[in-house]
Image: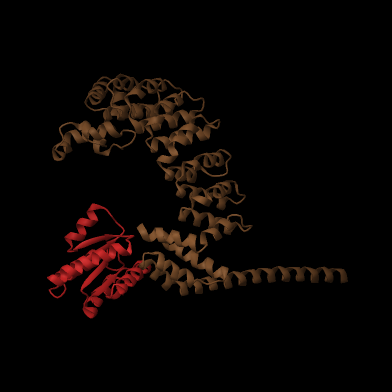
Chain colours: A red, B brown
Amino acid sequence: MARILIVDDDRFTARLAAAKISQLGHVAAIAEDGPEALQQVADFRPDLILLDLMLPRMSGLEVCRALRADAATRDIPIVMLTGKVQERDVEAGFAAGANDYLTKPFSPRELQVRLQAHLKHAMRA
Amino acid sequence: MEIALIFMLAGSLALLAQLSVLVAGKLRLDRAAAFERRVRRAAEADIILLLADEADEPARRRFAAALPSDPRARAAVAALILDYLPRLRGSVRDGVRALFSEAGFAEDYRRMLASRRREDRRRAAGALGALGDVAAFGDIARLLRDDAPEVRLQALAALGALGSGDAVAPILGAFAAGLVPFGPAAMSLLRLGAPAAPHLQHALTDPSPRVRALAAQLLGHLEWLPAAPDLSSLLRDPAPDVRREAARSLAHFGLDESCEPLALAMEDADPRLRAAAARALGATGAPRAVPILRRALADADPDVALAAAAALDALGRDGRAALAAAADADPRAGACADPVRAAGPGDLPLGPFGRAAAREVLDRATLGALHVADPAEVTI
């Protein structure tokens, strides 16, 4: 059982991802903006983060950079969630330290496959 | 005095009655909205679970069994699922469509298409379009002639979403009759994409010049090459708008064989057609367009001369050499050449100046990186 933090201000996407994560037997928490995400990372200690790129108050890229700059959080796998598909955004996400990208709208099955792959990899590491 | 009092009393009573009706109507609407909010809140968790299960068959069965029996509550649940539909894709979207059919929601909406309430008809058309319900095609097409403009617009959008080329004739019919405006009609037809193209080509012979102009314009956007000969013929159409749209569309194709009809169009009395034809000639990339465009640099209309200069620039080396020679010989041509040269090939809009200019950029900058020896191998 893994702890997964969903950072997305879109209630529908966050709830759908949380429902899928619960079905898979993991525990999900939701943060709706960047500062809340950083607080939740400290409190909830997630094994993986689903991080939306477009967030209020602090962008997903800034959150990603902040997490990678901290020794306590730099190894947490981050999957960026975004509606944007431009190459530049993908590059920026990876440059900020994201491990993977999931383009919205995503299917719950796609989310499941990506989560399992990253969690398996994280467990091995 | 008494009569005046009676009149005043009767007037007050009538006003009071009108106010009561208004207040009652408002209360009814508020109650209905509150009811819908309650139903949506209650159903949201179940819908999220259904979607998390990919709306597969067992999940759909469970969901359908728990649906409320009250028709108003069912309608509110269906509306909430429809709100989520644009944010779903793949198998889960297909699952939701199946649910609408199995749970009878689609049938409810099909019945609503004939409702006496215009809001019901509008909502039903939108829902069935979003669901891609092709069974409702005929009924939605009929709504293009609905009394209410908002219903006609929703039907237009729904037909665009259904994606059948059969929608072209009713949409163009409604457009010709002035029942739907140009913009939404064009958007709906473009959304149909390639299936619309043969029907639009057929519409190039429509008796209505508005329809011919719209069809000509869209065929260019769709880059439907089989229509090129018909569009060339339309350069001699009696209606100026049709001739102009035909020239603009030919610019999307950039075909060498369009040179002759476009050269004839350069003699037209309408300067806007001459400008469009000049741009289309630039898109052909054909060397024989050079002398025609060079002559057009002396056109009495400055927009035509400017379009000719830009087209010469877009034609490549030969065109640019001709433009430079003309600019040296004639200050008027020079005045047209300067802004074109200042813009540079990167600033030239693709489309009217498209392929030839883009190929030039590729020639100089990109071919090495693409490891391609022949620019013709590159699809633009």
Left or right of residue B53: residue A44: left
In percent of width and height, residue B250 lies at: 38, 30
Q: Is residue B335 visible?
A: no
Front-lying residue, B282 or B334: B282
Q: Going 18% across and 66% down the picture, which residue do you hit?
A: A65
Q: Quadrant of the C terminus of chain B?
A: top left
Front-lying residue, B223 or B112: B112
In percent of width and height, residue B193 lies at: 41, 42
Q: Going 69% across and 71% down the picture, which residue do you hit?
A: B20
Q: Going 50% across and 74% down the picture, which residue do you hit?
A: B38
Q: Is residue B337 visible?
A: yes
Front-lying residue, B107 or B244: B107
Q: Is residue B193 above or below residue B39?
A: above
In percent of width and height, residue A10 lies at: 35, 67
Q: Going 29% across and 60% down the picture, which residue do you hit?
A: A82
Left or right of residue A42: residue A19: right
Q: Quadrant of the N terminus of chain B?
A: bottom right
Left or right of residue A67: residue B226: right
In percent of width and height, residue B321 lies at: 22, 23
Q: Is residue B44 above or below residue B183?
A: below
